[in-house]
Image (cartoon, coloured by chain):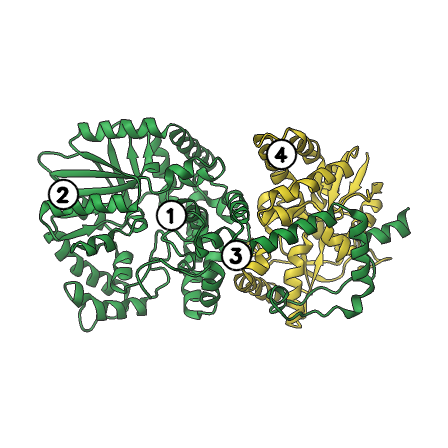
Amino acid sequence: MRVALFATCVNDAVYPSTAIATVKLLERLGVTVDFPAAQTCCGQPQFNTGYRRETEPLVERMTRAFEGYDYVVTPSGSCVAMVRDNYPRIGDKARAEGRGTRLKDAATSLVPRTYELTEFVVDVLGVTDVGAYFPHTVTYHPSCHGLRMLGLGDRPRRLLEAVKGLELVELPGAEECCGFGGTFAVKNADVSTAMGNDKVRNALSTGAEVLCGADNSCLMHIGGILHRQDAPQRALHIAEILASTEEEPAA
Amino acid sequence: MSGTFVGMPAFPKAAHEAVQNVTLRRNLRHATHTIRDKRAVAVAELDDWDQLREAGKQIKDHTLSRLDHYLVQLEESVTAAGGTVHWAADADEANRIVADLVKATGESEVVKVKSMATQEIGLNEALEAEGIAAYETDLAELIVQLGKDRPSHILVPAIHRNREEIRDIFRSEMSAWGRPAPDNLTDSPAELAEAARLHLREKFLRAKVGISGANFMVAETGTLVVVESEGNGRMCLTLPETLISVVGIEKVVPTWQDLEVFLQTLPRSSTAERMNPYTSMWTGTTEADGPKTFHLVLLDNGRTATLADEVGRQALRCIRCSACLNVCPVYERAGGHAYGSVYPGPIGAILTPQLRGTQSEVDASLPYASSLCGACYDVCPVAIDIPEVLVHLREQVADQGGKGHRLEKVAIKAATWVLDNPAVLAVGERVAAKTRKLHPRKIPGPGASQWTNSRDLPEMPAEPFRDWWKKNRT
């Protein structure tokens, strides 16, 4: 089984700890992970802002970078949704515009091999107890892409519930968007902030020490508000919780 | 506030005001969450909801793909049943047809059933210019009309008003339009409803002309359908001598069997009812009962152009249930007026730019008025993939290259170039990491401040992941 990590641009540049945790977690579960250096970004920001043609080189790059791997695993729900939902659309439109089937073929090749981390662990590896240790109170924000586009369902919850020492508390209004939304966060900063503030209010009402999610872009937004408010809670990616052990606890 | 949406500012600017309005936020939060929760219960009662949703989608798609055929069939059926069909290419033509029809009756006032199509074309204002008074009879529309306000929700146009505000509007405005509100009117729902009932009853009994829209038109028999909760629609559809219905061409369904699907999904999606209290259906005219004259004005007003767009055309499936508004976190915080159209919320953000084009500031800003969270798509009873259409419309707006988009395109192209060159990207990441101590968590100036006004930036790491990998795993 050849498994490649798609770290994502955000994790590569800003949250390497999440990508490192993903590597350590998968290795602990007996998976040999590779990191093809040709990878960069899935193109989600470009595409969702209305720049489909500017996304195309990145679709091709992604496909080239991950050629030959059985699985492409990424700790980002929204990047998986980008590949699954939008790569085929990009391919279809390119074909309809008379530019051949290259992008369509790229999508067809990459889509079935691309997995979100919790999906891969639960569905492919068949594991829910990953042997993690994290002695903190945690609340889980499911993020829209994981919740509605990928249908991750209770996979993250089952993984968290099996973590030793972890107390999982319910997040009120969990299914509501945090207000990040990519460039929405700056194009409609007022509404984005109002949504984020409500999410943070709900998160703080749980009394949890940690707000956990499976998408660092959402956590950058929620965490940024928490940090600004000097709140007694921090945002942390689920990979870092699942990678944490008694011998090597999360930072 | 004026009664028209002309000249509205871009969505972010209008929303900037709205998010700071504490009363509005409270009214909207309370109302949308209540109706949202009730809808979920009503939908969960049906174990074939997913099939109904798929059937509704397919019926609409099939009808839209043969719209020319079904509209001609509808015209024949309506004509055979004693009605007269008029075709209006745009708002001006529809307004002119209706005004001429009313004038031909010699009347100078009409009663109206709640109708999105007549709001879309600004019929009330057009009639007023011709010296014809149009009275809204739906309770919420009455509140909006009396308050010289604009609707902010498709189903509940006065959702932004609370009981105290409604009492004040009734007290100060009703007398100018007809029977005044009682002096001692309180804000109890029963008293407010009674005041409206007495005020409206006079108008129902006097009016010789009724104007409506329709939720559905059945091509095989020429039957029009209006579903409603208050019974005001039934009054307007049966008491006047002349009935004029203005209906968008996408409202046609082929058969009664098709109608059956929507009569299940619409009430549960909109008011969380198993069945709406009033379902009025009429086929042309009848000798002994109801209006003696019936006119159907079929309205295009941008719909044919929308139909030509392979991705955008799914917006024409919409049955105006409002479920997408009630689950939308952006609508909940920005309110309906910020969308600058009679169609607010997620459906408005994809419908308005298609019906009106994206030339005005507000219309060009609508496709961006969403975090693409997908809650709207989940609840849509005809499975309109609203996020897909939003992104598709963003592409059109970006291509048209208006305000801000030319610079944005340059920046996006530059970003793609960097991201298509991992070596360049790695250099950039290393520079950012090496200078991490210098990065502030708050940045002044336009653009960056849009982020940092409310959110700290994350701390930059000591090294990018790709360097960690190189050191530790290769």
Residue that carries the numbered disc 1 in the rendered image: B270
- Looking at the rendered structure, the kind of residue marked 1 is Ser
x, y percent for residue A97: 57, 32
> Can you identify the residue that label 2 sits on?
B242
Tell me the CA gap for discs 2 and 1: 29 Å
**Chain letter matching colour yellow:** A
Parent chain of label 4: A
Q: Circle 3 sits on which residue?
A: B403
CA separation in Å, label 1 and label 3? 37 Å
In what element is the residue under mark 1? Answer: helix
Give the amino acid at mark 2. Answer: Thr
Q: Is residue B429 above or below residue A126?
A: below
Cβ–Cβ below 8 Å for labels 4 and 3? no
| Image chain in green | B
Visible residue check, residue A139 = no
Q: Which is nearer the eye, B411 or A175? A: B411
Residue positioned 70% across, 42% down in the render? A58
